[in-house]
Amino acid sequence: MKRPVSRELVAASSRPMVLSILAGGESYGYGILKQVKLLSDGKLAWYDGMLYPVLHRLERDGLIVGRWQLTEEGRRRKYYRLTARGKAQLAADRENWRTVHGALEMSWRGNHG
């Protein structure tokens, strides 16, 4: 049985993951959780208690903006979308993660210079 991805790695990847998902269009908390599960083939264990503080921080930092909407069942649901600042942060995060990934790949291959 495979071990789950460490909490530290999940936490470190939470901002770029959420921003990437929202780059595909507006979504809400549970929709984002489902998308993370789908994208990771179930290997990333995200849950409400971890996601909502991330969404609140991203909103506070001006990277996303939320709006409340009533569902057909009459419940309120908050939908989030990227801001221009969020798109710029996503581009920076993407480049940083590619750099880290590339360095790890080289290291794992034994290419140490």
Image (cartoon, rainbow, N blue to C red):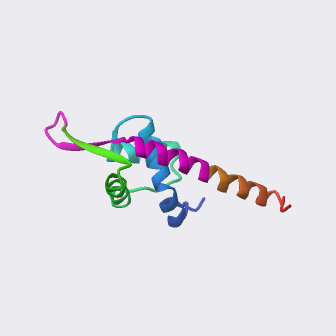
Residue 86 in magenta stretch: yes
**Residue at the (43%, 48%) spot, across then down:** 18
Q: Position of residue 111 (x, y in %)?
A: 84, 58
Q: Is residue 35 visible?
A: no
Task: Locate the N terminus and report the quarter of the image it occupies.
Answer: bottom right
Q: Is residue 30 visible?
A: yes
Q: Position of residue 7 (x, y in %)?
A: 50, 65
Q: Position of residue 55 (x, y in %)?
A: 35, 53
Q: Quick one: 75 or 13, which is closer to the camera?
A: 13
**Residue at the (35%, 46%) spot, across then down:** 64
Extent of the magenta region: 71-96
| Looking at the image, residue 23 lies above or below residue 29 | above
Image check: 10 left or right of 110? left
Q: Quick one: 88 or 44, which is closer to the camera?
A: 88
Image check: 92 left or right of 26? right
Task: Locate the C terminus and report the quarter of the image it occupies.
Answer: bottom right
Image check: 14 left or right of 71? right
| Looking at the image, residue 3 lies above or below residue 86 | below
Find residue 34 and report its image quarter. Answer: top left
**Residue at the (31%, 45%) spot, across then down:** 65
Outermost residue toward the left? Answer: 74
Q: Position of residue 70 (x, y in %)?
A: 17, 38
Find residue 3 and report its image quarter. Answer: bottom right
